[in-house]
Image: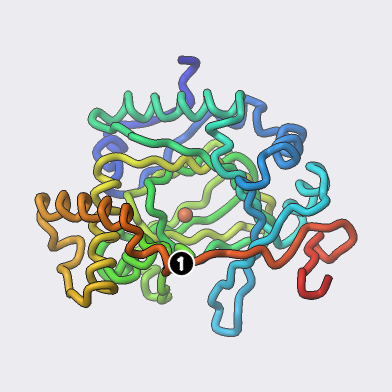
Amino acid sequence: MGQSVVRGWTDRDTKAFLKTPVRFRHDLVETGVFSDEALARLLETHPDELTDVNLNEFNADGMAVVRTGTRGGLDGHSLLRAAKEGRVWINLRKVGCSDPKIAPLVDQAMADLQAANPGFRPVTVYANLLLSGPTTRVPYHADTPGVCLFHLVGAKRIWIYPNQGRTLPDEAMEAVALREGTEDLPYRSEFDEDAQVFDLSPGQAVLWPFNAPHRVDNLGTFNVSLSVEFMTWEGRLRHGVYYANGTMRRRFGLSPAGYARTSAPGRLVRWALTGLFKRFRVNAAREAVFKADFDMAPGARDSVQDRAAA
Ligand SMILES: [Fe+2]
């Protein structure tokens, strides 16, 4: 292993790890691996099937509608310019698994976190690189895996909410586990009373408990963050409970107790049931499918060419 990536981790952070949000420092910016030149090369060479080009539009109620597109005919530098100036945000999925410079940094960061947090044993790790423009807002949502966000370029504000109680209703998280739509959750502004808010600058990272809802506003700058997603057995059991409960509620008309009221053995049973439900594809027909409705193209506004208008 190389030089450590995580900086300034304290005993207090160890106590809070995966229980409440933790902000800490990292050394990824100084590596030079995320320079403009490197980002343009990644944008050009990362496989199409792992490259998400998205556009958030907000309707009259302020609810976000996520549209998905393709990078079309833009080269890496043009895509980078479009992400810097425009409305799109780009997710290079799993880049931390395949890129020979990024993968060792992700491995080192996870090794550092494991060294600082006895008992932390990730069973899977993926790292995605997120590039987003000055006005990008990510709506209130929860992710199935654990997330550690290493911020690299620009300024963003993240609100992180408790992963229990009013901010994470069971049925809403079940819908996320079952992939019925996007990961968005119903949001009310009074939830902000329960949030912890962090303004992130390059060289800072934030890590939060499994399924903790969050939302993000870019603060008028182009942003780049490395999102390291991981699963542990705790995360798998959580997912198993939401997936199995959601299936029982929707497919079999049952009313299972929520996550917080499910005992440890009950969680194990639900995790096992989830394996069966997935194996027999009980929910396959209900999983949402997202189709591209725009392509990136030179000359179009924000380089976004709507398919309907093409
Ligand atoms: Fe997220």
Q: Considering depth in this image, is 102 or 269 the residue closer to the camera?
A: 269
Residue at (21% x, 55% y) in the render = 273
* Residue 85 percent across, percent down from the top left: 77, 56
Q: As displayed, is residue 21 above or below residue 189?
A: above
Q: How has the structure been colored for display?
A: rainbow
**Is residue 123 rendered to the left or right of residue 63?**
left
Q: Residue at x 48, y 43 (%)?
A: 149
Viewer can see residue 140 = no
Count residues near mark 1 (Cα–Cα under 10 Å), then give few for <14, some for 14-19, many for 20+: many
Q: Quick check: is the Cβ at mark 1 less than 8 Å away from ligand 1?
A: no
* Residue at image location 27% in from the left, 72% down from the top: 251
Residue at the bottom extreme, as displayed: 60
SS label for mark 1: loop
Residue labelled with disc 1: 184
Residue 220: % across, % down: 67, 58
| Residue 91 rendering spot, x and y as whole percentages | 61, 49
- Taking depth in this image into account, of 37 and 91 the one nearest to the observer is 91
Q: Is residue 285 left or right of residue 202?
A: left
Say which amino acid is labelled 1.
Asp
How many circles with numbers are drawn on the protein? 1
